[in-house]
Amino acid sequence: MLTEIGLSQVKLKDSFWNYYVKNIKEKTLPYQYKVMDNNMDISIEREREDENLPAEKSNALENFRIAAGIHEGEHYGWFFQDSDVYKWLEAVAYSLEISPDKELEELADSVIDLIGLAQEEDGYLDTYFQLKFPKLKYRELHYSHELYCAGHLIEAAIGYTKATGKQKILDITLKFVNHIEAHFGYEEGKIQGADGHQEIELALVKLYEYTGEKKYLDLANFFIDVRGKDPKFYEKQVAQNNREGLSDSHPKINETYLQANEQPVNQTTAEGHAVRMLYMATGMAKVANHTKDEDLLSACKEIWNNVTRKKMYITAGVGSTVHGEAFTGDYDLPNDTMYCETCASIALIYFAYELFKNEPKAEYVSVIERALYNGALSGAAIDGEHFFYVNPLEVYPSISKQNPGQGHVKTQRPEWLGCACCPPNFARTIGSIQRYLYTWEKEKQVVYSNLFVSSEVQIDDIKISQNTDFPKSNTVSYQLFSNDKQVTFKIRIPEWTKEPVLFIEGKKQVLKMVDGYVEVSRVWDNEVIELSFETPILAITAHPNVVADINRLAVQRGPFVYCAESHDNAEPLQTYHVDAKKISMANASFREDLLNGIIQITVEATQQKKDPSWDNTLYQFNFQGNLEEKTLTLIPYYAWGNRGEGEMVVWLYK
Amino acid sequence: MLTEIGLSQVKLKDSFWNYYVKNIKEKTLPYQYKVMDNNMDISIEREREDENLPAEKSNALENFRIAAGIHEGEHYGWFFQDSDVYKWLEAVAYSLEISPDKELEELADSVIDLIGLAQEEDGYLDTYFQLKFPKLKYRELHYSHELYCAGHLIEAAIGYTKATGKQKILDITLKFVNHIEAHFGYEEGKIQGADGHQEIELALVKLYEYTGEKKYLDLANFFIDVRGKDPKFYEKQVAQNNREGLSDSHPKINETYLQANEQPVNQTTAEGHAVRMLYMATGMAKVANHTKDEDLLSACKEIWNNVTRKKMYITAGVGSTVHGEAFTGDYDLPNDTMYCETCASIALIYFAYELFKNEPKAEYVSVIERALYNGALSGAAIDGEHFFYVNPLEVYPSISKQNPGQGHVKTQRPEWLGCACCPPNFARTIGSIQRYLYTWEKEKQVVYSNLFVSSEVQIDDIKISQNTDFPKSNTVSYQLFSNDKQVTFKIRIPEWTKEPVLFIEGKKQVLKMVDGYVEVSRVWDNEVIELSFETPILAITAHPNVVADINRLAVQRGPFVYCAESHDNAEPLQTYHVDAKKISMANASFREDLLNGIIQITVEATQQKKDPSWDNTLYQFNFQGNLEEKTLTLIPYYAWGNRGEGEMVVWLYK
């Protein structure tokens, strides 16, 4: 099994990613703290059109203060509001591991103190249930998110303890995990069910990996195994509460939405809520990587194939509908009503990485890369203080703002969201991009270089320096030192490159590609590897079953999917037409001044001429339009929506 | 002002329409009665995905029996369930006027007796409020539909009294209208508001036209004038009820949905619920036609232009979203998530007819025709016993059945719907198609022939016989007799004809077209007019602002919009490509055996060849597909969904 490289072992030197990592540390994390502290004068938007959704304030930290008895008041926000704090803390931990910062650490310590004060004597910790429904702890699992929040706490605790050496948050966490362990399991008297929102499964495996305590792996395995074993589990919990007079609710529970209609090991397609599905799949893969459960792994691969071959947008966005933030049928990929939650692309990264660790094929890293450079990175504005929940593939404000079926599609990134799962998820994931650069297999002494990102890494005795100006340049050079050991160095040659050429110490190599990686095995004594390749501008066609993309082409260069915005082009954007040949002949140029520095693409296109015959009619018989030659300017998808409201489209018309 | 011709004056001899009129009488009306009587073993479907919608049974007649004290029980169904009965009765009335039928009349008389028994002493009549909320009569107008139901009762009463000469239902109705008049108006102490769902406005004008009593016109005018005068009227009603302890509801009232955000005279675009909007616009036009209120008429025309030039599907469907069954923004015409309620196309017919009466331009009749032959006719199956609420322009069952955003789109017509507004609306409208064939202007002795439908009509002394095998043939002959009077005969030359040629007594005429009509003025003594024209197969292009129709063409021949179904073509339908030239060269042939006799079109098209390179991938770079020549078979849109589930598409891909 491959393992990740510790964040502190990787030194990022890359101009593209360093901006984001630094910006997350310097702007996003302080900003998010203030928002959670109700200390920012911002406009919080609902994530979709529903008046009942909480959006007055975050209150996430205040909920802890109230639970701790420091302040008086009522819980406000989603029942999973605690997880915002935990994900923020996890993001802080990664930032501190990458570059220590006293002030940020003190802020985090104060939050940890607060979490500790809010925790109950017996270890239970969930401000929503503590403050609002103490009698319903663990009894409304279909929606409660208690274990989901616990999962995020576990991830934060591991990260923070690793980064700072401080145990306090880990102690708090283990106390809560013990409480969970005492209440859940197949033993008589314990709850034989799992949280409606998966997350704790993958977190518990991380806890096992960190502590070496097998009981955490067992508990993770239990939560996966018990799910869907009794599809009526959640209904029975509700009925029991009603019988005991603890509640009087009659929710309609959709087991498929919760992936609880059958056991995960028997699930072969991605159904229901996209983030839940992919957190679950990540947990399944993590468990299987340790238990070597072939059935579970096989289910993971079927789910993977279903997602990536039938349900994934070109941006690595997933979730085709706002209804349940969910997957829909195969090949149903509408560009305007989709969901493509930032968290879902992030979850897809996690899932892909676990599968890659089991089976080091470039296929998995390709999806990680696609998500990192597109559907996940688009989740925040370049300023690091505005966030998308939903990442559309096309937006026509004149339509989307008046069609309630697109009510969830924002034309610009809000300052915060009532359901703020995505902003801290962005911070913790993009803020620790380092973890995806290299992966290694200690037993075989194999190092995988996954992404072209300038960096230095130390793995045991091995030192690797990667230098590149990618994506501005098409050459990457590595220098390796392995301290007299035989080490296999594998470099991923992305599917979007052309004519890759590899030199070692100036000598051209015959490329030996295995599963998308070129490999060179030797004792390394600071030899220089130079890789050069072309990054053609690619015209992408979608599977013919994708109705939404018929007669349309997307543009990709390197890992970046491109889009047209009306800031660079004359509205309406749907009147432009391109062809594959012109796309392949398009021009790419670095624009330092634009959007924090992007490679802009200009394509020779045609645009339908404005025709007065349309002034008073909606339809014409045998209309002969006139096209005029126009240049269509494209920018990387992740950078859209940073220049004020306008039209945006990824899939261009032929 | 033009006036309609009485149904009994028009004798339908047309093979196309006679089938529907006869089928409605012989099958649909008896079927609907049994359904309303809970006497059919059928599956009733919800009109959209919402578990709370009533769909167990119709109960419409039972509600009257309970209100009458004949049976015991509780009201079931929508608060406007009474209107199903009234619309059925109106459809029966038209059928009886066209061709008397003792059995059907007796059935209707029994229903009228029942309605009379249910009516309260003081004239009030609404089984929902009588049985469930007697204290809230006229007090929850934002949703109550009491006056909406009253409007349908008025229309039924006029129709039935005209058809049979029997006064009973009119007496019941006038008693109710008096009750309404006593409670609504600008006078002190009266309610100064209108029903949330417009309908009574147009009905009261019909009552004025039938009785000559101006007070009904005034009341109609009041309801239009008072609407939106105080946009908070509905909220205030609710608050008042709460204050008086009559209810404890806090509904979110959307004034735009109700077209109550401002006075109708100031409304210039079509917003909110589509049927409400168009019933209101019909009422406005009807009032204005009598009062000569230029401001009101001008508002009607602005609304008309907005609908027909920016918000109408090629099928004359309207309402682009299920959310509020409503209009959205200009040019927002998605083909898969739209609503296009059968009732909305019918309402558009009514609105168009009123504008035509004021201003006899073919533009209005073109829309009537487009709706009659397409978006309204598609509302029922050829068997007359299955009904669409929503009329999509494309359906891919593999997508629509798994995407909740298309949960309202049925792939086949249900046997009945929980909200059954459309089936009887279809019956009353299509069952009285006669009213649209001719219109006349008595003062000027001008007769308008609007549609090519074999028929005989008598208007005062004037007799017209129209003979045609249209749409099978392209010739129409008229014979006119005007009893020594000078009569101007105007024939509409539809926009979809080519090279129309007119002969009178064998002599070719120079066509004198005014506003889409050719006119001949003379004393008629059984002269024969012969009109011949071509019906080219037309490739339709949508306005370039319609994003959903970019790179797509629709096909029309005569008044029929065409569609492809997978019953005639190899799935998936989106892999077919057509071009305008091939469409113009397509073949049309009458298929007597198919779908009750249709003109089928076959177009030389191309289809993307199945390519194994797609087996395991969702996207390809620089993909070169292979097209193979294929014949694409098209059928008239109205006839789709009559052969079992499959794909259907109106807008073909270029």
Image (tube, coloured by chain):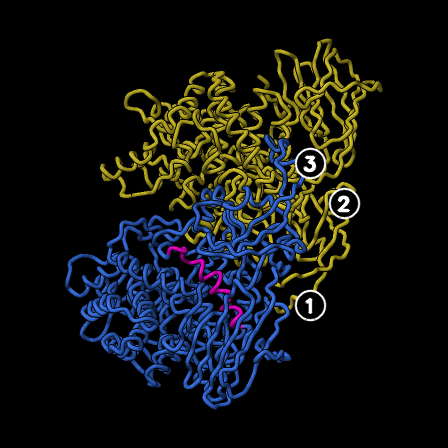
Chain colours: A blue, B yellow
Q: Is A645 placed left or right of B636 in the picture?
A: left
Q: Earlier in the sequence, mark 2 or mark 1?
A: 2
Residue lying at the far front of the rendered structure: A506
Instruction: State the residue position of label 1.
Output: B612
Q: Is A238 on the left or on the right of B614, as rendered?
A: left
Chain to which mark 3 belongs: A
The dominant secondary structure in magenta is: helix
Q: Position of residue B529 (x, y in %)?
A: 78, 21
Q: Which residue occupies the foreground of this view, A330 or B2?
A: A330
Mark 2 and mark 1: Cα distance apart in space: 29 Å
Q: Which mark is residue B582?
A: 2
Q: Which residues are magenta?
A: A364-383
Amino acid at circle 1? Pro
List x then y, in percent, for residue A485: 48, 90
Q: Is residue A163 visible?
A: yes
Q: Dot 2: within a 10 Å radius of its alpha carbon, few (fewer than 14), some, or many (20 or more) residues?
A: some
The residue indicated by pointer 3 is A621
- The image position of residue A87, as x and y in percent, is 33, 66
